[in-house]
Image (cartoon, rainbow, N blue to C red):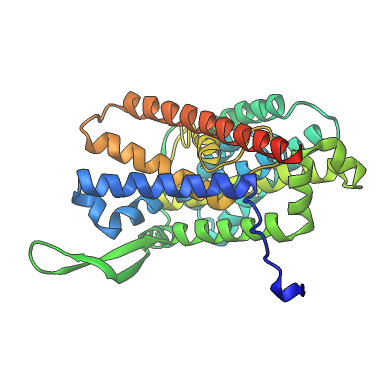
Amino acid sequence: MTDKNKIRQREPLTDTQLLLTITICIFFGMYILAMLIWGGGFLRPQKVFDMLNDNAALIIVACSLTIVMIGGGIDISVGGVIGLVVMCCVVFLNGGGSIPVALLLALGIGLGFGAVMGFLVAYLEIQPFIISLAGMFFARGMTTIVSVKPQKVAHEGFLKLMDTKIEIPWLGYIAKKGNLIPARVEIGVVVALAIVIIVFLMLRYSRLGRNIYAMGGNNQSALMLGINIKRTRFLSHVISSLLAGLAGFVFLMHTGAGNATNAAGAEMNAIASSIIGGTLLTGGVGNVIGTFFGVMTLTTIKNIVVTSGLRDPWWQSITTGGMLCFFILLQSVVLSSRAKSAAKRAK
């Protein structure tokens, strides 16, 4: 029998691919259900774009958490970094600073946090949760030192940048007066989607990405393969905080204001989005495409809760907690079933 006549067996999905598929199916199932039951805004493409506009910064910071979590670590300082970046950029811009330098300031703050925490975690082998917790408190404290009072951006150039929208006429809708309302997307959404693509390509095709997966999957095996674990862990934290700095700048582009409570809880929403997207806390499994759909799933359920008339904030927290428990349980059941099936085939 020649090779051409051989029947190729279809390779089974990896854990990452399987969890990604489940997340995407759940998101589209939830959104279609919302369209059928509530209709209204869910029927318009602008609803999806509004979800993206409101969560562009969360998408970026969720990607940063996904990188660290795939490597078997955690970083809860990202919310504090975002708050510090926002406040510093507001004060800098109102003081006459330029937009490009403000962006460099945001990236520099993120890079500084990432380098310090990455060094402590990777080379001094201190628990990442403890270090990132200290980083979160430090960033929140520094935010109040920069400015105790809430600040609004008064920089004319930055205000014009905030007002810039990308219009998509063919995805618009006809208003009651008969005029066409085009769909609008903020610049931050373009940045967030670009980050998703870049991080996806980095994790899948670069040596660093493969090393992060190997490190999270089995630390000892990665060492035996000759992977520099300390450098890989250090770089994962640096990239994570760098993206958090960028997320802070995108957050400012959306809100135009800074205060001491900016992005409070962003790290928890980012972790929840990553887990919903199929990233395991134990490491080695995850995908930023799944993280993107995790953010969209989390936002969709929150919109459904509000549309249902439950506008009190605690209902969204309760729903988020319930979804997180559901996805953790689902991951456990699916991966356990796959492990048992693989064991049976091996026998």
Residue, x 58% and y 27% (percent of image)? 141
Residue 241 visible? The answer is: no
User: In the rendering, at what x and y percent does residue 51 appear?
Assistant: 36, 50
- Do we see residue 194 in this rendering? yes
Left or right, 37 with respect to 206, comes to: left
Give the camera-side residue of 270 and 86.
Answer: 270
Q: Where, quadrant-wise, is the C terminus in this rendering? A: top right
Picture coordinates of residue 80, whole percent (x, y):
57, 34
Q: Is residue 200 above or below residue 81?
A: below
Horizontal side of residue 336 vs 167, given as left or right: right
Image quarter where the N terminus lies is bottom right
User: Who is closer to the viewer here, 150 or 51?
Assistant: 51
Q: Nearer the viewer, residue 231 or 140?
A: 231
| 240 lies above or below 327 | below
In the foreground, 305 or 134: 305
Up the image or down, 195 lies above or below 325; here it is below
Residue occupying image coordinates x 79% and y 37%: 218
Q: Residue furthest front?
A: 1
Q: Residue at x 30, y 50 (%)?
A: 32
Q: Position of residue 150 (x, y in %)?
A: 41, 36
Q: Residue 304 is drawn in which quadrant?
A: top left
The image shows residue 120, relative to residue 94, as above or below, that is above
Q: Residue furthest left?
A: 177
Residue 145 picture location, percent across and down: 56, 31
Say left or right for 320 vs 226: left
